[in-house]
Amino acid sequence: MKALKMKMIVFLMVAAITTLGFAQDTALPNVKILATGGTIAGSASSATSGSYSAGQVGIKTMINAVPGIKEIADVSGEQIANVGSQDMSVDIWLKLANRINELLSSDKVDGIVITHGTDTQEETAYFLNLVVKSDKPVVTTGSMRSSTSISAEGPLNLYNAVAIAADPQSKGKGVMVSLNDQIHAARDVSKMNTTNVNSFQSPIKGMLGGVFYGRLGFFREPNTKFGNTSEFSVEGIKELPRVDILYAYADMSPDLIDMHVKAGAKGIVIAGVGNGNMTEATLNAAKKAYEDHGVIIVRSTRAATGWTLRDNEFKDDDYHTVVSGDLNPAKARVLLMLALTKEKSLAELQDVFYEY
Ligand code: ASP
């Protein structure tokens, strides 16, 4: 009788532990969606019109438009901004980065999704990649078609982004950008087409992974510094040094460099022709901008893909120039703004472009 009682107690204990464990396993991951606007929150007067206004719909409406989203994660939304991403600003970046760091430091948040316009999404994602101090997943998403458009792809993109943010295998991958069933590393992705839903591509390194109705897998690891290994942070930062981008072309005039210096630029990224080239007169103006004003000149390229390499057609040391490697001009600008928050020699700045 006593043995039977004992058996009953053990059985009940095992049942209780199993139930408890089961309850823990089925608790949904907690994903916060931070909304900033864009076409994904845009609306038009007609489902077949290409004209629309970005940043019209609030985060609650967006979440409610995604069937099944509450079955894959415990989602809640917060409106950080509601702008077309052509109006994205350093102020919003700082607000976003500080809020993400605050949320991810809590045990109650497992991952973050950011809804964002597609025009400057790669810049915001790369900025966050450098300053978010957590291994938890952070995913940006958006859409090329407005929320009222025929075949709007925003709801599926948002569903997939939440699935990525909720999945433990997404940890430690840096900030990711997901649209059109693809997962890209923030550092490597570019908007490559003005209207197509397959606009986002990583032309040099390829996708990080793929996602299909919430099922996902990764093909490779990011291979530059980010997150906890990044030396950059937004702590105590209220603004960033001004860095401008100058587009190079045949017969480019050197006085453009002087205009940017006069306007207060601390750095200039040249979207150079080919391998980061510019007219000889512009190169001499760039050299003078560094010598007379300490303005840092970074050579990137206006070509859609490829590296800019040191000492390719002249010695970079002779002109005090830094090369961006495979960072496009917009991202080279983001990195230079953060790098200029620290005291660095030209050689150290060059290393930053190799490492990040
Ligand atoms: N101009 C829009 C934006 O970047 C375009 C889009 O989201 O697709 O906000």
Image (spheres, rainbow, N blue to C red):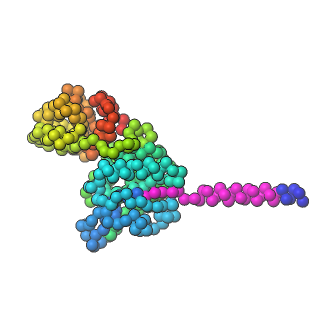
Q: Main secondary structure of the magenta part?
A: helix
> Is residue 21 found inside the magenta-colored segment of the image?
yes
Residue 251 placed where, x, y %? 9, 41
Q: Residue 244: tell me if it is visible.
A: yes
Q: Quadrant of residue 256?
A: top left
**Compared to 290, does 119 lie above or below?**
below
Residue 248 placed where, x, y %? 16, 42
User: For the point 11% across and 39% down, which residue is it?
Assistant: 255
Q: Nearer the viewer, residue 137 or 266?
A: 266
Q: Nearer the viewer, residue 206 or 155?
A: 155
**Magenta region:** 7-33
User: For the point 30% across and 37% down, which residue is it?
Assistant: 340
Q: Nearer the viewer, residue 205 or 127?
A: 127
Does residue 114 appear left or right of residue 322 in this picture? right
User: For the point 35% across and 66% down, which residue is it?
Assistant: 57
> Is residue 31 found inside the magenta-colored segment of the image?
yes
Q: Quadrant of the C terminus?
A: top left
